[in-house]
């Protein structure tokens, strides 16, 4: 009886080792890097637009769910010129013991633009004979759990980024920016929220014409265009073989996130056969591409978000894994559909 029990335990152990090889995130020598991927959704009562007139006279702080306008517009009803700034606030997640923030990306869906009262035209600010196409600016700030008119011009700006320009903005489209350092700063300052101000530089030209950009500010995980921060936590455990430097054997993708196609680039240090695999969040391999590298260097593969059977995949997080013998490199990509 004892011998039979030992045999059963040995068989179970062998089966566990066999199926463990299907895990796309494990290294060849058996060690695993554990990662948690999740999203933060905007806090409705602290996200939205604030409208003001010249000299920063606050008109209305609008925290209702719906669309947020950044730029300026003219109210024919009130016969008053307004400018507006958008604000986004997210509750910071609790981090499990042993984990740390690896990456965080703030994502906003730019739905529409209006320039000089003409729909579909990028905002145009007219200053006399000068015509200016204002840039979209995002600032990392802290306006706390209550918003008031003093926050129109924040006391402290921790970081400022150019989100988009006239040349780069395509409407409708997603705008994404790396806010990893912003979250790390907020955790270090013991904040419970990570908060941002979004506006067009110059605010307004006060010319009685509409010049604005609109994006959703409601927080609803069921609505794919809600603003969010997609973040990754990692336990930092990894046993990569350093006989080939990571910079020489790696995989990357551009654009990432993407909504149509993404170019996956494999950096291979020497000629030979490599396998490129794409896995879904469940660890299921959905696409395979074999690389016959005749020369060392970069090798590109254009992924059209379809599986091996030609079926369109669902939107979400995917993992690209490049393998060559005992070497392995992986990259997380986000498909927006």
Image (cartoon, rainbow, N blue to C red):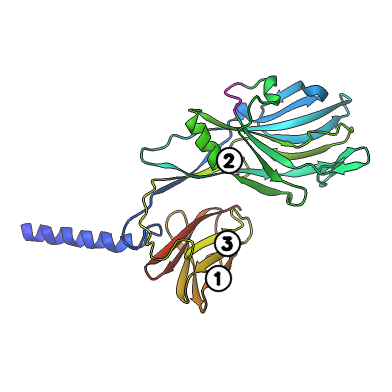
Name the residue: 40% across, 60% down. Answer: 24
- Label 1 or label 3, whichever lies nearer to me, is 1
Q: CA distance from mark 2 to mark 1?
A: 33 Å
User: x, y percentage for residue 15?
Assistant: 25, 62
- Residue 146 occupies quadrant: top right
| Labels in figure, total | 3
Q: Which mark is residue 305?
A: 3
User: x, y percentage for residue 167?
Assistant: 76, 52
Please give the range of residues in magenta.
Answer: 142-146
Say whether marks 2 and 1 touch (CB < 8 Å): no
Tell which circle, 3 or 2, labels the residue nearer the N-terminal end. 2
The residue that label 1 is drawn on is 299
User: Is the residue 17 above or below the residue 76 in the image?
Assistant: below
- Label 3 or label 2, whichever lies nearer to me, is 2
Q: CA distance from mark 1 to mark 3?
A: 18 Å
Q: Is residue 143 magenta?
A: yes
Viewer-closest of 21 and 129: 129
Q: Which mark is residue 228?
A: 2
Tell which circle, 1 or 3, labels the residue nearer the N-terminal end. 1
User: Is the residue 146 above or below the residue 188 in the image?
Assistant: above
Say whether marks 1 and 3 touch (CB < 8 Å): no
User: x, y percentage for residue 75?
Assistant: 85, 29
User: x, y percentage for residue 189?
Assistant: 50, 29
The single residue placed furthest to the bottom in the displayed view is 294
Q: Residues within 10 Å of mark 3 (few under 14, many from 20)?
A: many
- Label 2 or label 1, whichever lies nearer to me, is 1
Q: CA distance from mark 3 to mark 2?
A: 22 Å
Q: Is residue 251 magenta?
A: no
At mark 3, the secondary structure is loop
């Amino acid at each position: 009886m004892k011998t039979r029990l030992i045999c059963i335990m040995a068989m179970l152990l062998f089966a566990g080792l066999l199926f463990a090889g299907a895990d796309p995130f494990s290294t060849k020598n058996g060690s695993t890097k554990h990662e948690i991927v999740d999203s933060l959704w905007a806090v409705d009562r602290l996200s939205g637009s604030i409208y003001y007139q010249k000299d920063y006279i606050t008109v209305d702080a609008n925290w209702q769910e719906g669309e947020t306008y950044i730029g300026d517009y003219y109210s024919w009803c009130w016969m008053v010129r307004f400018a507006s700034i958008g604000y986004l606030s997210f509750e910071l997640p609790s981090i499990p013991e042993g984990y740390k923030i690896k990456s965080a990306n703030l994502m906003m869906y730019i739905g529409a633009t209006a320039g000089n009262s003409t729909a579909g035209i990028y905002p145009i600010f007219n200053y006399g004979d000068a015509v200016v196409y204002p840039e979209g600016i995002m600032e990392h700030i802290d306006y706390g759990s209550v918003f008031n008119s003093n926050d129109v011009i924040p006391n402290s700006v921790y970081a400022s980024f150019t989100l988009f320009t006239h040349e780069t903005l395509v409407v409708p489209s997603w705008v994404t920016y790396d806010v990893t350092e912003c979250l790390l700063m907020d955790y270090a300052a013991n904040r419970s929220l990570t908060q941002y101000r979004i506006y067009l530089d110059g605010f307004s030209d006060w010319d009685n014409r509409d010049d604005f950009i609109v994006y959703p500010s409601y927080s609803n995980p069921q609505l794919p265009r809600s603003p969010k921060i997609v973040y990754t936590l990692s336990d930092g455990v990894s046993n990569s073989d350093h006989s080939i430097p990571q910079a020489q054997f790696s995989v990357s993708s551009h654009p990432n996130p993407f909504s149509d196609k993404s170019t996956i680039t494999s950096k291979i240090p020497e000629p030979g056969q490599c396998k490129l695999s794409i896995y879904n969040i469940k660890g299921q391999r959905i696409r395979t591409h074999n690389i016959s590298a005749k020369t060392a260097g970069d090798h590109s593969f254009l992924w059209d978000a379809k599986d091996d059977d030609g079926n369109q995949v669902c939107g979400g997080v995917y993992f690209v894994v490049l393998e060559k013998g005992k070497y392995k490199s992986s990259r997380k990509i986000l498909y927006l559909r």
